[in-house]
Image: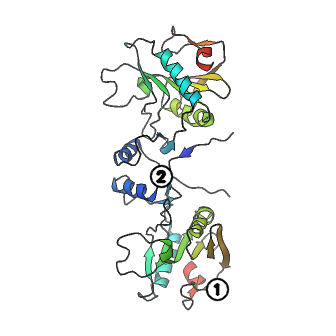
Amino acid sequence: MSVQIQRRLFTVQEYHLIGEAGILSEDDRVELIEGEIVQMAAIGTRHATCVRRLIRQFRQLPESSAILDVQNPIQLTERTEPQPDVVLLQPRADYYATAHPVPSEVLLLVEVSDSTVDFDRDVKVPNYARSGIQEVWLWDLEVNCLEVYRDPTANGYTSIQKFERGEIVSPLAFPDFEVSVDFILG
Amino acid sequence: MSVQIQRRLFTVQEYHLMGDAGIFSNNERVELIEGEIIEMAAIGKRHAARVDRLARLFSRIPESLVIFRVQNPICLDDKSEPQPDIALVQPRADFYEESLPNSEDILLLVEVSDSTIDYDRDVKVPNYARSGIQEVWLWDLEVNCLEVYRDPTANGYSSMQQFAGGEMVSPLAFPDFEVSINLILS
């Protein structure tokens, strides 16, 4: 018989209280996923390089069309506050000073995965779909490809497209902005 | 491939800071086991009645020999602060106001299990063994028997005896104090 236990889950509000109480420090790389405080994997050089290339690419978008956010929290639900690698946000004059961005403000969410691709694909992406994030790009560094998820539903994204080296892809929100898979994978 | 996630584990000190920050409500039943905050199962009528029977029995041991605690926390190590159903601890003038009883203070630890028997047997008992608690009684209400664990090692208790209805058992610390299995289980 398997051991069944119920871990104490946390709300976003409790998660922030834990931070304010000094329990989670700035150096603690964690995110709140479905009420669980999850340790993020250490960022390897390949992962870091891919994020740098994404920044280089996306900062070409005019400031008036998107805020480029890197490894900052977004609030998905009452129980989920992840820190995606890169997010394009709707511009806001206060740069989201009063509250973390919510799904309707996310134009594109990008995750880079090396060791964590199963967790990202099986837990985080469906979670993004349930909360209505319109588009997610998952860079799978293990097999060198990009998975593009669109059309969110409560049961996941109904559209998944795979892009390989040599191909070009554009975000839904910026159809004229072309990203070369080769450039991002290096 | 299965999804591997690494939960953020908490120390006893962090767990107390969370309590101080008001994250757990007063009537919330949680315990810290190996760095994880676990919600304790609701206490059913049968469980409560058996704990009361045990409490009446153990209250016959003279106060000069033992302090007898019911569903109070003990400190096992840096990452575990469980709340066993009953703990018989060494007498201390301050009744452990300054610090929680640790494994050296505990003469006998008793758990009553119905729905949580697997977790108690597979996670909590080995944890008690690792921290050196000399004797654990696990009342399994599903099959109506008592498991007595003795001789703690880092790999678990090296002695486990089962007692069923009709038998008598005595704690190591009080060899003349006899407990009738029938009195507790019937």
How dense is the environment of label 1, judged by Cα within 10 Å: few (below 14), some, or many (20 and up)?
A: few
Q: Can you give x and y, in whole percent of width and height, for residue B158 in the image?
A: 59, 25
In this view, the residue in front, A64 or A119, is: A64
| Mark 2 belongs to chain | B
Residue A149 in view, yes or no = no
Left or right of B104, for residue A131: right
Image coloring type: rainbow
Residue A23, visible in the rendered structure: yes
Q: Look at label 2 and name its amino acid.
A: Arg
Q: Are marks 2 and 1 in contact (CB under 8 Å)?
A: no
Q: Which mark is residue B124?
A: none
Q: Is residue B72 above or below residue B22?
A: above
Q: Is residue B39 above or below residue B112?
A: below
Q: Which mark is residue A167?
A: 1
Crowdedness near tag 2: few (<14), some (14–19) or many (≥20) residues, C-alpha within 10 Å = some
Residue B138 appears at what percent x and percent y? 58, 26
Which numbered marker is on residue B8?
A: 2
Q: State whether discs 2 and 1 lie on one chain.
A: no
Query: Which residue: 57% across, 32% down?
Result: B44
Label 2 secondary element: loop
Q: Residue furthest bottom?
A: A176
- The x and y percentages for residue A41 are 51, 60
Amino acid type at circle 1 is Glu
User: Considering depth in this image, is B22 or A27 the residue closer to the camera?
Assistant: B22
Furthest toward the front, the residue is B45
User: Could you say where residue B149 lies in the image, as x and y percent from the top left?
Assistant: 57, 23
Q: In the picture, which quadrant includes the C terminus of chain A?
A: bottom right
Instruction: Name the residue located 51 percent from the left edge and 43 percent from the top edge.
Output: B38
Q: For the N terminus of chain A, which image quadrant? A: top right
Direction top: furthest residue: B176
Identify the subunit bearing mark 1.
Answer: A
